Amino acid sequence: MRIGQIVRVGGTVPASSHSQMPSLRWSLLLPLVLLACGSPQDDEQKGGPSDPSDPAYVPPNPEIDLPPGSLDLPWEVSSDQGESYLPDVFYADPSQNEEVYNYALNGHVQINRLIYPTIGNPNLYTQTDAEDSFMTVMRIEDAAIEHLAPSFFEVPGSWLQSVELTGADARNSIDFLLVPSQARGTLTTATTPIEPDGRTSFRIKPSKIYAHPLTSDMPEALRARRTYRFVFDQAAMKAVHAGLYDVRMEIRENTYLRQIDPKGEPIAEWQYNALRVFDQEPNEYRVLNVTDTQVNVGSAYSGKSNPQIQDFVQYMRTTKDQDIRDAAFITFNGDLHNGGSPGGLLQRFVTTTYNEEAKFILDQLKDLPFPIFLVRGNHDGYASLGHVPGPVKAFDTAIGESVAEVVEQNLPSAWPNFSTTAYKSFISKTEKFPGGYHLDLFGGRFTRHPGKTFTDSWLEVPIAKRNMMLYDGMYQWQKTFGPRYFSWKFGRNRYINIDSFELRQHRRTGWGMYVNNYGGGMSDVQLEWLDRDIKRGAKWSQDVTLLAHHDPRAGHKGQDQPYMYSQIDFFGMGQSTFDFVKEHAIDPAMCKLPKWALGNGAELDCLHDGLQEWMRPDTEFDCGADARLPSGKCDETLFDASLPAGQQKFPYYSALKMIDLLTTSPNVRTLLLGHT
């Protein structure tokens, strides 16, 4: 965990003012002091002079005061103030998180139907901002609320539908409850309906309910649930005091929690620290920034991270430092997880690593006295098919352990219709390429490309052709903390949180921590969204702070830019170990030789220090439609620079695209990064 300095827009606060912070070996804390953070005061948003001849007249902003959802694609959710709450409402769907191991935490799937707000993507609500509202978003199967008899109506000027729950009454309802975090006790996680008392819990009633229509072009897997937005305006939030709240949702039937699956949980879901209510947005505020905690469990390696994060949480809860106590929220710059440890190689340890780490992390984060916005890093997204290194397999066999045994002890599996026989067959078929089939999948079932319709942007890959993942840290993240990228606002500032480890699934594979590609990358879908989100911030006159884990300039420590590593296949732990030794021992020794003694390839190796910051394109898939073969892969012969002018095509460098976007967007004021 790394700590920086205290930064003020327009000035710097001495870091020595926090000299009482406990010494955390891997820990850094960056309280940001942001100025000009009140609600927008310009006439454009506050209804200034309406006469165009008035010198103070400002033309209406075309992105403001539009019908709800007008700017959203069918799979997006934004707020009335332009925040991108959810660029992908399907992120937590079962069909988008299919793996062999179960990502439930002690039998409970942390993110299921209630997909916004979450502990890693909370909501900030201001009582005195007449334009502000609180929103929850749910993905609900029709069977869960059929007793409430929902009716759907057109909304003029919007593709959304308004919803009336015509069967709802005092005994049958969808209830939303706010539980103050300091008073949660067992209320938040109660297995029976809770009755609010206006002190330890509040019931809030939505002022509006909207639904995303189920269109004919939606893939069948995405039609299994419907997206609902529950909006709570100023009147609905009037009785809620300033503070930090857990958000709880209950679906009631005859006063009891509804249960549509006899083997499943009653329908009550909750998210810790998911809402912070402010009396008013201050003109100046502080933000705490933390990065690279790399939490690990189950081995001696945990001593390098876990006590420090526990100390950090305790300090945040007890400090008398007013600068910290007054902070508005915490931002995070990735590598929340470690995804294993160098010595943690046994099958049970590797298979359960992300799940066990997630349990520990969630237990710690929920005790922080702040909302926390989480960024995903490379350690948060490693994956594995489950090809066990030979020595590990031999040792485990001797003690009667196997991946299959570990999985069967944690059924039901998140992989649909899982069977040990099918999994063993898949492992056998992929023995010669343990990194997996090369597919244009970042995760989930769908190949994605920028587009405005499901037909253009969502192409389902048959499950029989997909890699049968033992685990994927991305899935554990999405089912525990929230979406991988999004944006929010506070006062005049816009924060954009991106996922800079968006490599394709077969490029993130390995065995535990032993992977080959750990530098950055972004899909064209995310970059297209980022472009729109930055431009939306500019139209709202918002200064943008961009949070990411990797540095798109590549290099390391400000040097060797723009050196980028090639994305390579995983062929086993031995290869990863050799690459690590080469990068950290062989290359540094070789590079001390005089230049005349180095060949061209060796001289190129000496341009970097072995630490991946951003990756080169995946030349199999990172190309435009005009360079693709019928198989969907790139025609790599077109990348030959010796071809005549006009015939050359070049792979899509996400880092260069992102740098172009940032350098041509003057409202992007601050970048907060992690990694190295």
Image (cartoon, grey):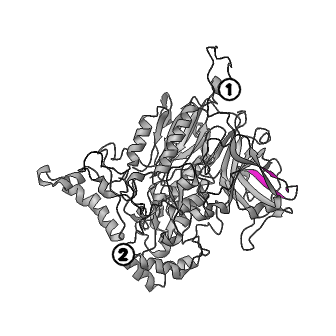
Residue 296 vertical position relative to residue 1 in the rendered view, above or below: below
Residue extending farthest to the right is 170
The residue at which mark 2 appears reads as 432
What residue appears at the point 46 percent right and 62 percent down from the top-left corner?
A: 505
What residue appears at the point 42 percent right and 74 percent down from the top-left corner?
A: 387
Front one among 71 and 169: 71
**Kind of residue at badge 2:** Lys
Q: Which mark is residue 288?
A: none
Q: Secondary structure at mark 2?
A: loop
Residue extending farthest to the left is 596
Front one among 151 and 591: 151
Number of marks in the rendered image: 2
Q: Is residue 325 magenta?
A: no
- Residue 504 location (% of width, % of height): 44, 59
* Gap between marks 1 and 2 measured at Cα: 64 Å
Of labels 1 and 2, earlier in sequence is 1
Disc 1 + disc 2, Cβ < 8 Å: no
Residue 603 vertical position relative to residue 95 in the rendered view, above or below: above
The residue at which mark 1 appears reads as 46
Residue 418 vertical position relative to residue 318 in the rendered view, above or below: below
- Classify 10 Å Cα crowding around label 2: few (below 14), some (14-19), many (20 and above): few
**Kind of residue at badge 1:** Lys
What residue appears at the point 57 percent right and 62 percent down from the top-left corner?
A: 96
The residue range painted magenta reads: 163-178
